[in-house]
Image (tube, helix red, strand yellow):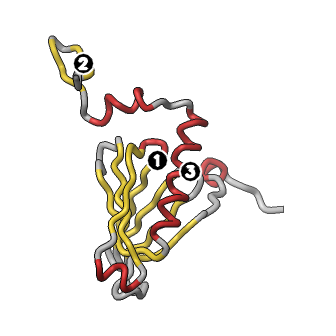
Amino acid sequence: MAKIDRLTQLAGNEDVLWQDRKRYLGLPISFTKYRFDHDRFYCRKGLFNVSEDEILLYRVLDINIKRSFFQRIFGVGTIMLYTADQTSKSFEIKNIKNSERVKKALSTIIEKERDEKRILGKEMFGVSGALEVEDGVSHPIDMN
């Protein structure tokens, strides 16, 4: 029986729910890979110098889809994620296949994650930048 070290236990076993590559002319010929599991979205870029970005899905504030004329011709689309993350306030998932289905799946998982963590919209309101600081105390901006 193989002994499992503590790092392997902490890293856990991630079940990838979806993965794809950024596409050119509908073909997956880039070094940008996207994937998500039950609670995180990952973007890995590069061949020699590789960088990986990770976004916790419960921190996504809004999600939308863009499909230009040429994207529709080649059967791809771009999903925009607007997050409460400090490093990636907006994030593009560019030129992916089945973009509408992926957007619906992401929306479902995001709502499920928020419900599990009991995060309400008003709790995310302050991190989206809608706070004003007065005398060292932050207050929500009155939108009325």
Q: Disc 1 marks which residue?
A: 56
Answer whether labels 1 and 2 touch (C-beta < 8 Å). no
* Residue located farthest toward the left when viewing the structure as drawn: 135
Q: Secondary structure at mark 2?
A: strand
Quadrant into which the C terminus falls: top left
Please, is residue 16 above or below residue 90 in the view?
A: below
- Foreground residue, 75 or 17? 75
Q: Quadrant of residue 52?
A: bottom left
Q: CA distance from mark 1 to mark 3?
A: 11 Å
Which class describes the residues within 10 Å of circle 1: few (<14), some (14-19), or many (20+)?
some
Answer whether labels 1 and 3 touch (C-beta < 8 Å). no
Q: Disc 2 marks which residue?
A: 138
For marks 1 and 2, the one nearer the N-term is 1
Measured from the top left, where is residue 123 in percent x and y? 41, 27
Q: Secondary structure at mark 3?
A: helix
* Residue located farthest toward the right when viewing the structure as drawn: 1
- Foreground residue, 51 or 65? 65
Which class describes the residues within 10 Å of circle 3: few (<14), some (14-19), or many (20+)?
some
Number of numbered discs present? Answer: 3
Mark 3 residue type: Ile
Q: Secondary structure at mark 1?
A: strand
For marks 2 and 3, the one nearer the N-term is 3
Q: Residue at x 42, y 81 (%)?
A: 75
Measured from the top left, where is residue 49 in percent x and y? 32, 73
Q: Residue at x 39, y 53 (%)?
A: 63
Please, is residue 24 above or below residue 54 in the view?
A: below
Q: Left or right: where does residue 50 sit relative to residue 9?
A: left
Q: Residue at x 30, y 82 (%)?
A: 70
Q: CA distance from mark 1 to mark 2?
A: 24 Å
Mark 1 residue type: Leu
Answer whether labels 2 and 3 touch (C-beta < 8 Å). no
